[in-house]
Amino acid sequence: FSYLANVDLSSNLFDGPLPLWSSNVSTLYLRDNLFSGPIPPNIGEAMPILTDLDISWNSLNGSIPLSMGNLQALMTLVISNNHLSGEIPQFWNKMPSLYIVDMSNNSLPGTIPRSLGSLMTLRFLVLSNNNLSGKIPTGNQFQTLIDPSIYQGNLALCGFPLTNECHDNNGTIPTGKGEDKDDEDGDDSELPWFFVSMGLGFIIGLWGVCGTLVIKKSWRYAYFRFVNKMKDRLLLAVALNVARLTRKV
């Protein structure tokens, strides 16, 4: 089968270890079978040009192999509905083309790697129904992945967009919308200071002008001469315009 590029054996009764195919295969669909055992640890080296991998709905166990981080062309990764365990690896920044990642319905423990947020092409992420814990990362691509169903079913997971608040030794740490509320409260407390500073600026500016005129006699005379001169010029301009309009009529 070395000439095969696309393999789809989905929805059969194949069992045994998950098979590896030739290095020419770019799409591999083995979902909904009876494959068991771990994902081959050398899958990243054996099938380096994979773009789509779907091995969901089997009985696979063990950890996600680190060699999977070598699949730099991978766009779709679906490993849901198995018995996978072990923490989610940190190799995601090596896979810049990922568009879909579904790891739901396994037994994956630990925290969600922040490196998942570096996948700027990632549009669909499903991590529900695992044993994940800790705070959901924020920033980067995570700010677009705000559907609670992405993370539900992980009882120890907390933070926006879930309703579970995160806690530490000092008490509750508001997350998500709670942070927005804190920002609003902060804006309200800063509002009076804005008006105070504006008033002080007006007083200082006014005193800077008027105080100088009061103290400096020569400046006061020069100022009033300037005002009178501008008044005369304005009156002259108005008179000329009125006369010009009268002649036209």
Image (cartoon, helix red, strand yellow):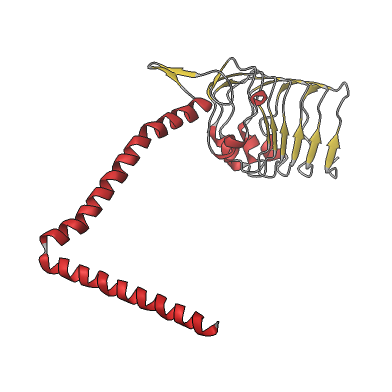
> Which residue is more in the foreground, 136 or 219?
219
* 49 shown above or below 153: below
Image quadrant in which the C terminus is located? bottom right
Left or right side of 222 for 50 = right
Image quadrant in which the N terminus is located? top right
| Residue 99, picture quadrant | top right
Left or right side of 138 for 97 = right
* 34 shown above or below 209: above
| Residue 108, picture quadrant | top right
Q: Residue at x 53, y 37 (%)?
A: 139
Residue 243 % position (x, y): 45, 81
Residue 80 % position (x, y): 72, 24
Residue 64 % position (x, y): 64, 27
> Which residue is more in the foreground, 192 or 32?
192
Left or right side of 52 for 210 = left
> Which residue is more in the foreground, 101 or 227?
227
**Residue 91 can be seen, yes or no:** no
Left or right side of 11 for 136 = left
* 222 shown above or below 117: below
**Residue 143 can be seen, yes or no:** yes
Q: Residue at x 66, y 22 (%)?
A: 128
> Which residue is more in the foreground, 199 or 189?
199
| Residue 182, picture quadrant | top left
